[in-house]
Image (cartoon, rainbow, N blue to C red):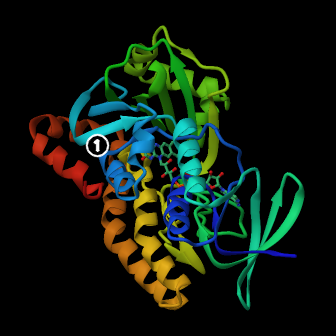
């Protein structure tokens, strides 16, 4: 017999697990489906902003993350390939914490609230049916079909073409490669550092267990020039920005922590509703240099949860859910997305970046204003 759930969530990243925690905690029968197993490494700068922590606290999840002993970070430093640098005070205390630990603990928290978690299972496609949706899965034991009254997309920036986000770009110039790896033996202050190089930028952040996460975004030309391998790309970035090379001096890549992802398109049009509610990166992706993607993923779940709850209770129509969620999503995120994309565009142009950094050195209040414009409230 076909299994039936109140809600099925595609993807147990931050947005999916947060949503499952709230809805399962509210008494709904929730199935959270994740194509990977936990724990797993993920391409991410692993910088958890103060705003992300605010939402974690609201969702009752801050303590479980704090228990993992993240590294407190209060400052940021931007460094151009020519060595021009700009120190920035963060608007609060951020955390450095691996996605390896973070995503696993949040998925477990969702289970503890009563959500059913199916890992190593991919949602292939869905179709509407009389009672909601018929959803086709493929797991370790082969294909399966389940039904759910409501369905939510939280599969991140890139999933199957049959699922949201469907607004993909064909413009290769806008697509990039994300690469990350953990380093041991790097002397690192409690600062998140951003190093620019021709064709991309790298974020370096201290994380738990004395390690340092190095994560970069590079265009295809830079990736090809580096040799198309993860370790070659990391080494090339360190040679193209000598300050990054000095930062990583004496350090070594921890085996089995290096991962890559492509294509990454931070310019994809925002679509918080695409037949179903889209959370986190499935709705839109803010450029990684803002360090705000995880905060947006968590906050989108916080915005959507009461509406999903009202829909499941029969108090809100699907059209009403779509309309209210889209409106609150755009009110909350549209302007910071625009600012973040403009900043990334400007900082990726060496002359403009140098001009902006010099301006920032003389006008720290302008820098604070720009930083604030890319993020939500604490
Ligand atoms: C290079 C880079 C650096 C970044 N650095 C930072 C940073 O330092 N700080 C920050 O806040 N943000 C950063 N981000 C952004 C951040 O990683 C994302 O915004 C965040 O992970 C979005 O969370 P999510 O839950 O929407 O998606 P994800 O975390 O991507 O989770 C989606 C999940 O869905 C699963 N999935 C996908 N398709 C299916 C399917 N069909 N069936 C089942 N499961 C599926 C995936 O396996 C994944 O686990 C960075 C991004 C990049 C690319």
Q: Residue at x 48, y 19 (%)?
A: 239
Front-most of residues 284 and 244: 284
- For label 1, the residue is 352
> Does residue 356 appear to the left or right of 169 in the view shown?
left
Residue 56 in the image: state x and y as whole percent. Answer: 39, 52
Q: In this orientation, which residue lies closer to the viewer: 144 or 246?
A: 144
Q: Is residue 211 visible?
A: no
Q: Pinpoint residue 55: horizontal percent, then vertical percent.
A: 36, 56
Q: Is mark 1 within 8 Å of ligand 1?
A: no
At 55% across and 21% down in the image, what residue appears? 235
- x, y (%) of residue 360? 17, 39
Q: Is residue 63 above or below residue 212?
A: below
Q: Locate residue 321, reporting x and y percent.
A: 48, 84
Q: Is residue 304 left or right of residue 129?
A: left
Looking at the image, which is closer to me, 98 or 8? 8
How many residues crowd around disc 1 within 10 Å: few (fewer than 14), some, or many (20 or more)?
few
- Is residue 18 shown above or below 106? below
In the displayed orientation, state which residue is furthest to the top.
250
Position of 280 relative to 203 (above/below):
below
Under circle 1, the secondary element is helix
- Looking at this view, is 112 or 6 the one in front? 112
Quadrant of the rendered image containing residue 130: bottom right
Q: Count the marks: how many? A: 1
Task: Give the position of the N terminus as an image quadrant.
Answer: bottom right
* Corner quadrant of residue 225: top right
Residue at 44 percent of width and 51 percent of height:
294
Q: Residue at x 64, y 35 (%)?
A: 259
- Any part of residue 361 in sight: yes
The quarter in which the C terminus is drawn is: bottom left
């Amino acid at each position: 017999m076909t299994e039936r759930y109140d809600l099925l969530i595609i993807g147990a990243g931050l947005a999916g697990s947060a949503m499952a925690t709230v809805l399962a905690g509210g008494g709904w029968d929730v199935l959270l489906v994740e194509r990977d197993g936990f724990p797993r490494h993920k391409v991410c700068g692993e910088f958890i902003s103060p705003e992300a922590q605010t939402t974690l606290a609201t969702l009752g999840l801050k303590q479980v993350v704090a228990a993992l002993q993240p590294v407190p970070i209060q400052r940021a430093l931007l460094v151009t390939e020519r060595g021009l640098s700009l120190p920035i005070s963060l608007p609060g205390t951020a955390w450095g914490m691996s996605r390896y630990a973070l995503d696993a603990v949040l998925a477990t928290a969702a289970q503890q609230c009563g959500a059913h978690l199916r890992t190593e299972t991919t949602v292939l496609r869905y179709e509407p049916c009389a009672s909601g949706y018929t959803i086709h899965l493929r797991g370790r034991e082969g294909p399966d079909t389940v039904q759910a009254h409501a369905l939510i997309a939280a599969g991140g920036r890139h999933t199957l073409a049959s699922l949201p986000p469907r607004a993909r770009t064909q413009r290769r110039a806008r697509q990039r490669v994300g690469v990350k790896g953990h380093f041991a033996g790097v002397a690192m202050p409690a600062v998140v550092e951003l190093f620019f190089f021709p064709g991309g930028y790298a974020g370096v952040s201290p994380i738990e267990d004395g390690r340092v996460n190095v994560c970069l975004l590079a265009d295809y030309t830079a990736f090809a020039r580096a040799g198309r391998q993860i370790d070659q790309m990391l080494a090339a970035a360190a040679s193209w920005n000598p300050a990054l090379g000095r930062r990583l001096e004496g350090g070594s890549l921890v085996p089995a922590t290096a991962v890559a992802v492509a294509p990454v398109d931070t310019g994809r049009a925002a679509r918080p509703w695409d037949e179903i509610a889209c959370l986190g990166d499935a709705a839109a992706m803010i450029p990684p240099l803002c360090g705000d993607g995880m905060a947006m993923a968590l906050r989108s779940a916080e915005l959507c949860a009461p509406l999903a709850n009202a829909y499941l209770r029969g108090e809100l129509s699907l059209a009403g859910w779509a309309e209210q969620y889209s409106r609150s999503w755009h009110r909350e995120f549209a302007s910071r997305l625009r600012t973040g994309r403009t900043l990334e565009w400007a900082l990726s142009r060496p002359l403009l970046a140098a001009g902006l950094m010099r301006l920032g050195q003389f006008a720290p209040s302008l820098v604070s204003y720009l930083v604030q414009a890319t993020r939500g409230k604490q």
